[in-house]
Amino acid sequence: MYKICIYILLALVTLSAPSCLKDSKTIFDKSPAERLDEAVRMNKELLESSAEGWIMHYYAGKDYSGPSYTLLMKFKDGKITVLSERVPDQAYTSDYDVVQDQGPVLTVNTYNEALHFLASAALGYPDGIQGDYEFAFISTSTDVIHLRGKKWKNNMTLTRMPKGSSWEEYMLAIVTIKDALTSSSFSFKLGDKELAEGTINTAQNRLNVTLGGKEFDTPFNFTDKGIVLHSPLVVEGKEYSTFTWDSAAKKFVSGDLSAVLFRPSGYKTQDFWYGTWSIKHEASTAPGVRRTPTLLQIEAPTSDNDKAKGLLKGTLTFQKKTYPILVPYDKAKGAIRIIMQPIVKNTPEAPAGMVLYPANISEDGKTNIHQEQSEYGITFAWDEDMGMAIATGDKTPDIGVINSFFGVAYEFQGNQRVPMVREGKLVTPIVMPKIEHMTRK
């Protein structure tokens, strides 16, 4: 019986061999170059096949460490038009192409403000926010295209917009949800069970909460109905990633999991912070630094972009010299922050501007400056009993808790901006050691 089975199998293999050879010839009758040419052509046709365009879930920062954005894209006759939630009322058009590399690559090959801004370098930030404007095709279907940023390797998606849908209506729905989020503080509940408090931060589009002993820190994208997390929350073995905004109840809902908006104690609205404040910090021992008040004047944002991101206009006065800075408003706490940032003001002591770096000064006087690109800094939250804004520094993995700020001067070497070093030390025209609090002037 065993021999009969073997003979039958051999006969079947022999009979099927010509068919297999024919299929093999069909598959491999084109060279690799021809197959790549065809893939490039088909992907370009797919991009331009959507009259309404595509919704991109975009992620910046190495390993998804940066902000995320929802972008609307339309491709037509070699042109790309992009509308970003970052600037929701202004679309930008430029050239694009699909080119050959290791495989097909979508490249935006002339400047597009909506995309190239996310990949642009700035003073003190050679990688910008680590964004991409070139994307490798990973897989495609009629309605969904999976891409990967060519430089920073973050996976992103393009989803076909439904027929008859409107960019204006879609972006207006996102703006309406964002405007309703008057705080970034949320109470997470499973049914009626209280789980934890966390944040849904619209400045960076990141969610952070600890559930069941596990910390979740993930970017998310806005949709016209709510948010979609890049990585799901896992509660009691169940995954939650798509949340719908309930405007009446002021909460995000995904099945039996909800995140309910609330305002913490000591919360102050944005306009509370407008005015002039005196920053209390230890006196500097640096040569030539006199005891003069360090002041921070805060005003309303002056651009739509800054307004959308909660960036207040600030003027820092140190040693009677003024410097323009941006002051983020923390919607989670109703507080303000000073963070690492470039100071684009060329002066004799800083001919190529400065970067305001956070630092830690230890009890024994040792100074460590955090020079990696980040948004680490110090939060000033109002204390009603003390009548002042108390300073609380972020904890960093490299230097510990931030308690100070230094403005490091830059100079030009050729066309490059580099930190100024004199006698083996960084030149620091701004020195604010061991910041304690702010009081209104």
Image (cartoon, rainbow, N blue to C red):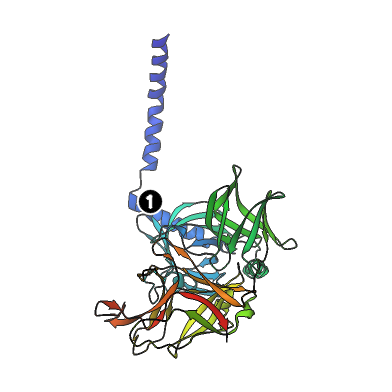
The C terminus lies in which quarter of the figure? bottom right
Disc 1: which residue: 35
Residue 90 appears in the rendering: no
Is residue 66 at least partly visible in the picture? yes
Quarter of the image for residue 340 reads bottom left
| Residue 294 versus residue 24 in the image, above or below | below
Residue 348, given in percent of the width and then of the height, sits at 34, 90
Instruction: In the displayed orientation, state which residue is furthest to the front.
Output: 364
- Of 107 and 340, the residue lying toward us: 340
| Kind of residue sitting beneath label 1 | Arg
Determine the residue positioned at 42% across, 81% down.
283
Give the camera-side residue of 373 and 54. 373
Q: Indicate the position of residue 79 as horizontal and vertical percent values.
A: 48, 70
Residue furthest to the right = 248
Residue 341: x, y in percent?
A: 44, 75
The number of numbered badges drawn on the structure is: 1
View extreme (top): residue: 1
On the image, which quarter does residue 137 sit in? bottom left
Picture quarter with the N terminus: top left
Which secondary structure, mark 1?
helix
Left or right: 13, with 331 as reference point: left
From what the image shows, is residue 61 above or below residue 269? above
Q: Is residue 346 above or below residue 419?
A: below
The one of 292 and 26 positioned closer to us in this rendering? 292
In percent of width and height, residue 7 lies at 39, 15
Which class describes the residues within 10 Å of circle 1: few (<14), some (14-19), or many (20+)?
some
